[in-house]
Image (cartoon, rainbow, N blue to C red):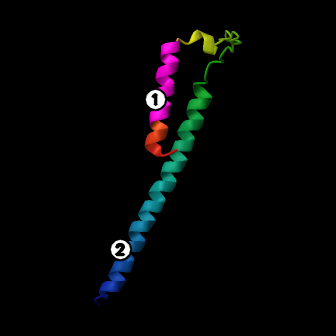
Amino acid sequence: MQQSIMAQGADLMLFGMGAVFVFLTLLVFCTRFMSWAVNRFIPEPEQVITPLAPLPSVVNTADSIEPKVLVAIHGAISQHRAKQGL
């Protein structure tokens, strides 16, 4: 007896989706098993935590910037604001 094309399509879809589901389920279990095995038989060495040295404080005042640089920055900001209509 010949099945209709819709029944054949549904059978193919169910077989394909079932195969994908079984494959992905197997993949998840294999990945979990491998993760467990690696953690059990090859543990990570304990890391020694050393305290960080305090960062040196950097003092940057406007006096340490050259006047030519300040004029250039002011000019660039003025041009940008004029271009933007601010």
Residue 83 to residue 45: above or below? below
Residue 64 position by quadrant: top right
- The one of 39 and 46 positioned closer to us in this rendering: 46
- The one of 36 and 81 positioned closer to us in this rendering: 81
Residue drawn at the location 47% of the way across and 55% of the way down: 24
Mark 2 lies on residue? 12
The tag earlier along the polypeptide, 1 or 2, is 2
Report the span colored magenta: 67-79
Residue 76: % across, % down: 46, 29
Mark 1 lies on residue? 76
Name the magenta segment's main secondary structure. Answer: helix
Amino acid type assigned to the residue bearing label 2 in the image:
Leu
Residue 70 highlighted magenta (yes or no): yes
Residue 32 position by quadrant: top right
Residue 19: % across, % down: 42, 63
Residue 5 to residue 80: above or below? below
